[in-house]
Image: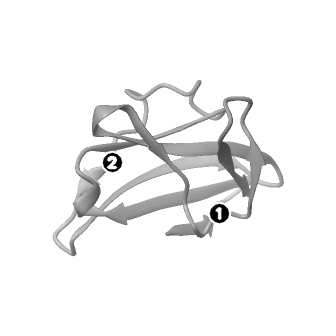
Amino acid sequence: MIKRAPLAGDEVKVTFAVPSAEGRVSVVGDFNGWSPLATPMKARSNGTRSAAVVLPAGRTFRFRYLAEGGRFFDDEACDGREPNGYGETHGVLVT
């Protein structure tokens, strides 16, 4: 799940959420250098894990989720998918 909330100026708060059953998960993308340490998702009382980032409005970003064991997966709620050059896809997010 992806939620967007406009902020003052030209920024958007983007909140990513996945079921907690996925275990430890990070959001990796071109907005954080694809670093698994930059945006870890935190467990929530509602049975999900979530993380939020503030991004410039009107831009397109690529991202994936990285779960325990090095397993990547995409978000069904992304704005689209593109080939990632590794035989898989990454999600597209438009702010």
Across and down, in percent, residue 28 comes to 52, 37
Which numbered disc covers residue 78? Answer: 1
Across and down, in percent, residue 6 comes to 66, 66
Which numbered disc covers residue 2? Answer: none
* Name of the residue lying farthest toward the right: 58
Q: Amino acid at mark 1?
A: Cys
Label whose residue precedes the other's in the sequence (2 or 1): 2
Q: Nearer the viewer, residue 55 or 39?
A: 39
Q: Residues within 10 Å of mark 2 (few under 14, many from 20)?
A: many
Across and down, in percent, residue 19 comes to 31, 66
Do the residues bearing badges 2 and 1 touch, measured as CB atoms within 8 Å?
no
Q: Secondary structure at mark 2?
A: loop
Left or right placement of residue 13 versus residue 9 in this view: left
Please name the residue shown 83% across and 54% down the image.
Answer: 58
Q: Classify 94 as above or below 86.
A: below
Q: Nearer the viewer, residue 91 or 32?
A: 91
Q: Secondary structure at mark 1?
A: loop
Q: How many marks?
A: 2
Q: Nearer the viewer, residue 51 or 8?
A: 51
Task: Nearest to the eye among marks 2 and 1: give it.
Answer: 1
Across and down, in percent, residue 15 comes to 49, 60
Q: Classify 77 as above or below 71.
A: below
Quadrant of the drawing holding the C terminus: bottom right
Q: Amino acid at mark 2?
A: Met
Please name the residue shown 21% across and 75% down the image.
Answer: 46
Q: Residues within 10 Å of mark 1 (few under 14, many from 20)?
A: some
Left or right placement of residue 22 versus residue 52 in this view: left
* Name of the residue lying farthest toward the front: 87
Please name the residue shown 57% across and 48% down the image.
Answer: 54
Which numbered disc covers residue 41? Answer: 2
Label 2, label 1: how many angstroms apart (C-alpha)?
17 Å
